[in-house]
Image (tube, rainbow, N blue to C red):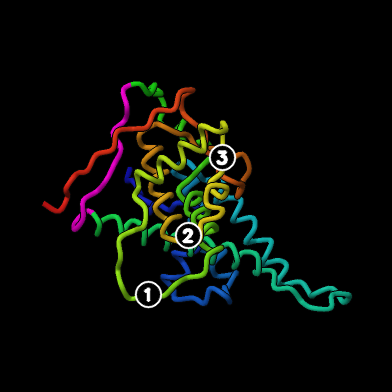
Amino acid sequence: MYRVKLPNFEGPLDLLLFFIKRDELDIYDIPIAKIAKEFLDYVRMMEMHDLDGAGEFLVMASTLMQIKVRMLLPAPENEEEEVDPRADLVRRLLEYKKYKELAGELSALEKEQLKVYYRQFFKADPHLVPLQDDVAFLRNVTLYDLIATLKRALDRIPKQFVHEVERAPVTVEEMAMYVLRALEERQQVTFMELANGMTERIRIVVMFIALLELIKSRAVTLEQEDIFGEIVIRRATERIVMPRFENLDYGA
């Protein structure tokens, strides 16, 4: 008996983007019949090998078939303007593609930073109570949820095209203290509430990095109650302790 190794995809949208990129298809004019067939072939392979996560792929397969049927049926006569059945799928694909590209850019920037500059990070304080499950610090929050929240905050501020590279007006440590001070006044706060009033995009980015460091140091937890809802930041312990701040020279 031989084993078949299937390529791993982060989800059904990731698989659809793979097909579109591989076959150089127009994302705004997706050939649903072709894509649906290939998608179903992949889902059947998943079912044959009892792979985890086949459920969400089956839901997408059903969606593709519904779109295919709607495209074959004549449009109702009372519809003033014909709506493309693929419109919602295209919107979701474009949104996913944008977040995936942004995640790649953030990862690339982090790698470049490690090559050239020192990296600042928090060392967990011994007074903080460690949890058995690290996932408890991120409740219903994924990487794409974090990136989407960052993008929403940045979109409020117009881009400034500058040619000089300057140091950030604030440090990661200062932004971490800003977050923790907000949690001293109340038990929870959202990222958007913290970003309100900020007029410089760089401050929001530095605050985002500080938040990641606070999660890593187990000082705060994140939770998202609703899909695409606000990300709520809470203190991880009753007593707020500022993690020790250290500099490591990665460029040496």
- Name the residue: 41% across, 59% down: 202
In this rendering, which labeled residue sits more in front, label 2 or label 3? 3
Q: Is residue 239 magenta?
A: no
Mark pair 2, 1: CA separation: 24 Å
Q: For residue 55, what is the image quadrant?
A: top right
Residues drawn in magenta: 114-126
Residue designated by label 3: 189
Residue denoted by label 2: 99
| Mark 2 or mark 3: whose residue is earlier in sequence | 2
Residue 161 location, x and y as percent?
A: 41, 75
Query: Residue at the location (89% across, 75% down)?
Result: 78
**Three-letter amino acid code at the position of disc 1:** Val
Q: Quadrant of residue 203?
A: bottom left
Q: Which of 46 and 21 lies nearest the eye of the viewer? A: 21
Residue displayed at 73% across by 68% down: 70
User: Which label's residue is closer to the chain start, 1 or 3?
Assistant: 1
Question: Horizontal placement of 59 versus 149: left or right?
Answer: right
| Res 37 seen here | no
